[in-house]
Amino acid sequence: MSSLGRASAVIGAGTLVSRVTGLLRSIVLVGVIGAVGSGPADAFAFANTLPNSVFSLISVGILTAVIVPQIVKATADADGGNAFISKLFTLGTVVLVAVTALATAAAPWLVTLVAGTAPPSVQAMATALAYWCLPQILFYGLYALLGEALNARRIFGPFTWAPVINNVVSIIGFVLIGALFAPVPTQAVDWTPEMISALGGTATGGIVLQAVVLLLFWRRTGLSLKPDFRWRGVGLGDVGRLAGWTFLMAFASLAAGIVQGRIVAAASGVGSSAAVTGNAWLIFMLPYSIIVLSIGTPYFTQISEHAAAGRHDDVRGDIARSIRTLLFFIVAAVAAVAAAAIPASRVFTKTSEDAQSAALVLLCYLIGLIPLTILFIVQRTFYAYDDTRTPFWFTIFQCVLIVGTALAAWALLQAGVLPLTELAAAVALGQSIASTVQVIVATWLLHRKIGGLRVGTWMLAIARFSVAGIPAGLAGWGAYLLLGGTSGWATSSVIAGTLATAIIGLVVVVVYVAILALMRAPELKAAGALVRRFPPGR
């Protein structure tokens, strides 16, 4: 457990700094081009989402699911996995270059696909930006390929710290854009080619540096990386079989996301649309990234090692232990973010009224945070057993639900039941409902596969944490009201929203821990030992 704690500390610290600088990046971007009702903000969101979507198709669909378990196994080879990894990286780079070239050439069609219901001026600006942003696919892919290989070799830090460079470059670039082109137009039709080039170039330049910096740490793996086009004879066929299912799974998720984005695009220039959902997702992912990725990633490596060695009882123990540990932190995060939803949203909007509209989207996403946390471990356990087919099927099930709920929101909009300003929130709620049902099905399927998941201990832990989390969340909401609520200083500015969010979060955490201490919750001691590993020098 000590090695897991140290690894979690390194990942957690890097993720925290990365996410904080990422938040600053988004704050600066909102300050320059706006958010709610801003055509340029939505255009950038559409264009910059395209490489992220294709990257997710490659990374989530292939790298995370396949690379870590396969590299762990390859280290048992006589050469320590050198031949396998060189061939894998060569093949991966070739695929990335081809996909990037095709996606960039198809930029106009991709923009129409994701933003076809947006105003023509927004679509035109998004297309121009897409030519700058889509080359990010290559560098996102290289970053993920290098990072996952480092993780598999238990070198966890660089992968989580590299995005800080991207965020710093972007912040500097956005500030310069705001200074050079002030006042920045609030209508997409008024943006010049020079302004679009500066915005797109800044976004892509940061991603390039993010990938390049990982090469500086490759020597620590002890592996020699060189081009090798002889792809036969080292098991890449098995990788292709496994990756095929995960690629289809990620493609289905991408398709569902496109449906959601196309529907939400109808509100562009009017209310919460692509920029708001992107920022709400950023807030939503902050606790997920800091908590779930930092603690869960080392567990995934350990689960993969135990599964490869046939130590199935250890795998079951890892699953139950990791989920209980993750939920201890996540329930507190859900309570804190829910209580501070409005001031937190004010950080990414320009007025208190816009913050209230954005907060509704955030709350609808937040419902799915606990299920998503459980799914992280459940899904990766399937990957550890080289089973990518089962995750494909329960992800297809989730995608059907996502599309169904998004279309239902669109139907309600057309019927005049759902206001256009609440369309994004309805789509986000559908996402959370689909994720909740998905995790129930996924857990049941994993129980059928390996048995002994000790689900009862998860449910007891959730109940115990909820007994503490609900009053803690109410205490945080009370603190928000004491700060003046929607008419007080907590939503008067970006700085005030940030400070209010910190105060509310602190209140929630203190009350949460105090209640669990009174209950003598067994997870409190283990979580405390884990947290104590985060300060420098420990």
Image (cartoon, rainbow, N blue to C red):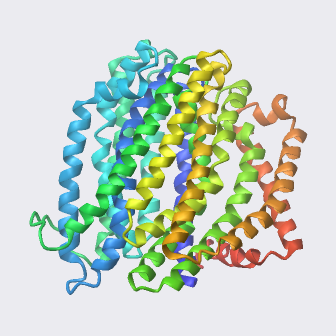
Q: Is residue 41 visible to the viewer in this orientation of the structure?
A: no
| Residue 126 against residue 96 in the figure, above or below | above
Q: Nearer the viewer, residue 488 or 92?
A: 92
* Residue drawn at point x = 55 percent, y = 17 percent: 269
* Residue drawn at point x = 70 percent, y = 43 percent: 498
Q: Quadrant of residue 383?
A: bottom left
| Residue 361 against residue 455 in the figure, above or below | above
Task: Farthest residue to the front: give it.
Answer: 448
On the image, the x and y values in percent for residue 405 come to: 57, 35
Q: How many marks?
A: 0
On the image, the x and y values in percent for residue 65 come to: 38, 62
Q: Is residue 255 visible to the viewer in this orientation of the structure?
A: yes
Is residue 328 found left or right of 483 in the rendered image?
left
Q: Nearer the viewer, residue 235 or 175?
A: 235
* Residue drawn at point x = 74 percent, y = 37 percent: 342
Is residue 425 found left or right of 522 in the rendered image?
left
Image quadrant where one finds the C terminus? bottom right
| Residue 409 against residue 379 in the figure, above or below | above
Task: Farthest residue to the left: give it.
Answer: 230
Is residue 266 found left or right of 70 in the rendered image?
right
On the image, the x and y values in percent for residue 209 come to: 34, 51
| Residue 469 against residue 484 in the figure, above or below | below
Q: Quadrant of residue 150?
A: bottom left
On the image, the x and y values in percent for residue 210 come to: 37, 53
Q: Nearer the viewer, residue 23 or 432?
A: 432
Image quadrant where one finds the N terminus? bottom right
Is residue 232 found left or right of 6 in the rendered image?
left
